[in-house]
Amino acid sequence: MLASSPSYKPDIFTQRVTPQVWQKLQEGDQPFLNRALQGYPPGSTFKVVTAAAGMQSGHFSPQSKIATSAFISLGGIQFWEHSKHGYGVIGFRDALAKSSNTFFYRIGLTVGPEAIAQWGKALGAGTSGILGLDGGTRGFIPTPEEKEEIFDEPWYTGDTVSMSIGQGLVQMTPLELAVMVATIGNGGKRVQPHLFTSETNAAALQPKETGIDPAAIEAIRQGLIGAVEMGTAQRLNDGSIPPTAGKTGTAENPGPKPHALFVGYGPVDDPEIAIAVVVENAGYGGVAALPVAHEIYKVYFGQQATGSNPGN
């Protein structure tokens, strides 16, 4: 299911649309814009990609531990952690659960932007449109070469740092974020979004192997489970729904407040549903996006329990 708000009533087009009505639809919050297919900075939800790139690069294993700190300094610029003193020496599970910045800064600086872009695309960024539906945009994870070609600017080390936590030039659509987290829930198989249930069994639409090592997928899964059990997504761990896994995100943007994001899937032992939520200019992901995901889960699992069709 794709949902975008604010929306409009399609029945206005069953009769002549006056210039006044048309103008109103173009103003304000742009209801014609399908936000599910528009690019946003993914913020900390993108740490899933950086984690995959780190382990696939060979520089890190699923058991690797990295020292975190209050900040790292590059060229006199400080890139900050969430915690005043860092989180100590931690592994992938705690880094994802607590959403450590300095952990992923150090991974990004070690593996480089090309590796992050490679595995971001493998997980769906820039590649996950809907078969049979035109319109919208695709995500974008630039390499240094692409940045120089498109923006006529060199790549800076700070670009790599920002990229590693889903900021800077990185863009992903909510649909791509859902594909990304579904790929983790699927054990490394990327789905192809499509419109019709009759297409589900088509050969071209079967989930595709990403090539991510199963041990790396499991490490990321444990991090997303940890985020719900004891990290930034604990609100989902209130007993109202089956155990799920997920990741919050808060993405800086030119607006008055950051965008709030959440990605997740559930149940953890046999995933059925993947969710991506973006709330524009709403602040922290755990405050604004997580409650939306919680309500979606409640409806889905409630309908499953009663045997009704979640698609209705």
Image (cartoon, rainbow, N blue to C red):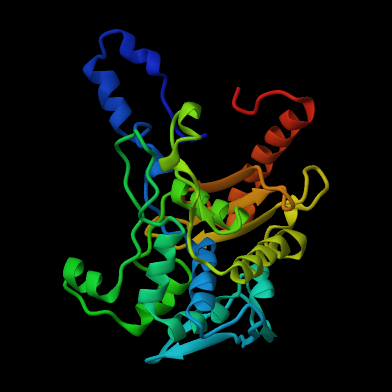
Residue at 52% of width from left, 70% of height from top? 52
Quadrant assignment, res 139: bottom left
- Above or below residue 115? Residue 224 is above
Instruction: Give the image location of residue 262, x and y in percent.
Output: 58, 53
Q: Is residue 193 visible?
A: no
Quadrant assignment, res 134: top left
Instruction: Give the image location of residue 228, x and y in percent.
Output: 72, 58
Quarter of the image that includes the C terminus? top right
Q: Is residue 251 left or right of residue 254?
A: right
Observer-nearest residue: 111 or 5? 111
- Determine the residue located farthest toward the right in the rendered image: 239
Residue at 67% of width from left, 67% of height from top? 223
Observer-nearest residue: 280 or 207? 207
- Above or below residue 72? Residue 185 is above
Instruction: Give the image location of residue 206, x and y in percent.
Output: 48, 44
- Determine the residue located farthest toward the top in the rendered image: 15
Observer-nearest residue: 56 or 143? 56
Q: How many marks?
A: 0
Instruction: Give the image location of residue 204, x and y in percent.
Output: 41, 42
Residue at 45% of width from left, 50% of height from top? 176
Quadrant assignment, res 19: top left
Q: Is residue 74 visible?
A: yes
